[in-house]
Image (cartoon, rainbow, N blue to C red):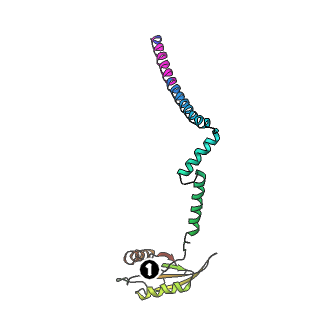
């Protein structure tokens, strides 16, 4: 039984080998034909009194004329220069913090007065005291009575003026009020624990 299988495998292997060889040989002949065809075209130009390098240079010059006078390297260099000019023209980005947007009048929100609670809501923090005072006045004018300024030094950054609301006795009351500020007034706040 083994002897009958072995000749069949050998025949199949030799057919595969012959097929692959034919494909490779065909590819080589095609490549050789292309190279010979290009060589003949260059030889015809060279036969007219022009050497091989001269004909390549002339072909490059013809391409430059067709592309508007720029070669590959020159086009890249032009793109680099244009990008550099755009970077110089770009407007600087402002990192200055803007004042909080106007807050609509509270709708039945009762804000705890200054009390003994240790939780507060910080609305903003400014380096400039006048900005903090301006926001404090806006909030008071719109019905928030327990608005205060808290000064504090930040290591390596200097003095900051923070605008805070209320003093809540529990974290849950502070978080509830924070959610209501966001939903009803689009006013974001940071829950902070006050020093007692």
Q: Which residue is mark 1?
A: 101
| Residue 105, x across and y down, in percent | 37, 84
Quadrant in which the N terminus is drawn: top left
Image quadrant where residue 176 sits: bottom left
Mark 1 secondary-structure assignment: loop
Q: Is residue 115 visible?
A: no
Q: Majority secondary structure of the magenta segment?
A: helix
Q: Is residue 61 visible?
A: yes
Asked if residue 58 is positioned above or below residue 90 in the image, the reply reads: above
Query: Can you name the residue that lies furthest to the front here?
Result: 48
Residue at 58% from the left image edge and 51% from the top image edge: 72
Of residue 105 and residue 153, the one placed in the foreground of this image is: 105
The number of callouts visible is 1
Query: Can you name the residue that lies furthest to the left here?
Result: 108
Decide if residue 50 is on the left or right side of residue 116.
right
| Residue 89, x across and y down, in percent | 56, 69
First to last magenta residue range = 4-21
| Residue 123, x across and y down, in percent | 48, 79
Q: Magenta span has 132?
A: no
Asked if residue 45 is positioned above or below residue 113 in the image, the reply reads: above
Of residue 191 and residue 66, the one placed in the foreground of this image is: 66
Of residue 180 and residue 117, the one placed in the foreground of this image is: 180
Residue at 48% from the left image edge and 14% from the top image edge: 6
Residue at 52% from the left image edge and 84% from the top image edge: 131
Asked if residue 140 is positioned above or below residue 189 in the image, the reply reads: below
């Amino acid at each position: 039984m083994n002897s009958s299988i072995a000749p069949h495998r050998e025949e199949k292997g030799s057919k595969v080998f012959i097929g692959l060889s034919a494909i490779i040989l065909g590819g080589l002949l095609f490549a050789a034909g292309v190279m010979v065809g290009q060589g003949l075209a260059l030889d015809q130009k060279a036969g007219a009194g022009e050497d091989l390098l001269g004909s390549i240079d002339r072909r490059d010059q013809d391409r430059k004329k067709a592309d508007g006078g720029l070669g590959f390297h020159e086009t890249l260099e032009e793109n680099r220069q244009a990008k550099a000019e755009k970077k110089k023209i770009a407007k600087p980005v402002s990192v200055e913090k803007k004042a909080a947007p106007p807050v609509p009048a509270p709708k039945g929100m009762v804000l705890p007065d200054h009390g003994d609670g240790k939780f507060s809501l910080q609305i903003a923090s400014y380096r400039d005291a006048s900005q903090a005072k301006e926001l404090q006045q806006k909030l008071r004018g719109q019905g928030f009575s327990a608005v205060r300024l808290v000064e504090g030094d930040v290591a390596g950054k200097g003095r900051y003026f923070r605008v805070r609301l209320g003093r809540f006795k529990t974290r849950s009351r502070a978080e509830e009020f924070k959610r209501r500020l966001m939903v009803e007034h689009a006013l974001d706040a940071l829950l902070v624990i006050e020093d007692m």
